[in-house]
Image (cartoon, rainbow, N blue to C red):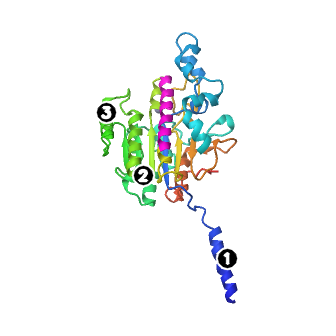
Amino acid sequence: MNYNLKNKGLLLTVLLFVFAAPALAQGRTENVILITLDGARTEELFGGLDIEILRAITKEGPVQDTALYKKYWAETPEARREKIMPFFWGTLMKQHGSIAGNRRLGSTAEITNGHRFSYPGYSEILTGEARDDVINSNDRRRNPSPSVLQFLKRKLNLDSRQVAAFASWDVMNWIVESEAGAITSNAGYQAYEHPDPEIQALSRLQFETPTPWDSVRHDLYTFRFALAHLKTYQPRAMFLSLGETDDWAHDGRYDRVLQALERTDNYLRELWTFLQGSDRYRDKTTILISVDHGRGDTAGQWTGHGRRIEGAKYIWIAVISPESSQRGEWKQTATVYQNQIAATLCRVLGLDYSEHNPRAGKPIQLR
Ligand SMILES: [Zn+2]
């Protein structure tokens, strides 16, 4: 072989290597943020105010006279949902991301666990696997399976502040890690230590502003602590778990459910504005927003969820990612599952979650 041919051979080898690069080639994502809205139904998310529920809860007079109707009603589902979540629908899903789960358009997202309540749902999200025999209550029991957050900490060689979970529901401390203290975790009525005096004041105030529920603090505190942590410690993996949408629904307070969604929309706006103003996060961050379970799909069942409530298996999954150019609602696509979320979070970072849990759902195909 003369010199020239040898060089060509080398070039070919290099080219082959480049084009046969492993399927897990690194994209632009360097950070991941997972956000959940406990038990937020597909009905309100995709369709806004549910007139059947409003009729059922209106004690006297026509529904048109109610404050909820005046504030949130519009003729089309698209216009209604935008009245509750104007940033999510008007900006985030139009310009930056997409969402699966609108069955009206032929897109379905489902959970695979059979329990249809919170611990099994969060565990399925965080471990990529339903374990109905083991994860079968909402009790404060340590998750036996290490979570995707622990996997990311190990694979990316992060310290415990760079992998953080903030949750309104106290049981989340038991779900997010199989070993206490592996990651930063702050959930329920729990003090959060931070150098900013304003955050210190909020940390004290959470104990003086009880919700009607012993195990769930107001989402306001959860969000403020998470945002402060993000700004100060710049974690590469963050889980923000909001809870009020579920608890107000159990209490039959439809007004408060819609208001909680509206406040969440403001949190998303504030979070997004911060991320886009940050060199660390802008265009390098994948955000997945989803839900632990759905709830009943009728005016008689909307407050509940669980094994016997069929509608509770339906969820939605929103993706805002530099790895995806898709915008708006998914249409006529294969069903996606809750157990795929963990692997998707790894996939966008160029990591293969199946090496951690071979039984986990495979990454969602982003387009
Ligand atoms: Zn619930």
Q: Which mark is residue 137?
A: none
Asked whether 25 falls inside the magenta stretch, the response is no
Judging by the rendered image, the residue that carries numbered circle 1 is 12
Looking at the rendered structure, the kind of residue marked 2 is Pro
Looking at the rendered structure, the kind of residue marked 3 is Leu
- Does mark 3's beta carbon lie closer than 8 Å to ligand 1? no
Give SS at disc 1. Answer: helix
Residue at 54% x, 59% y: name it.
350
Q: Which mark is residue 205?
A: 3
Q: Is residue 60 above or below residue 241?
A: above
Q: Between disc 2 and disc 3, whose residue precedes? A: 3
- Number of other residues with Cα within 10 Å of mark 3, as a class: few under 14, some 14 to 19, many 20 or more: few
Give the residues in magenta. 253-273
Q: Tags 2 and 1 in contact by the CB under 8 Å rule?
A: no
Q: Residue 357 location in percent, x, y? A: 50, 55
Asked whether 265 falls inside the magenta stretch, the response is yes
Q: CA distance from mark 2 to mark 3?
A: 25 Å
- Number of other residues with Cα within 10 Å of mark 1, as a class: few under 14, some 14 to 19, many 20 or more: few
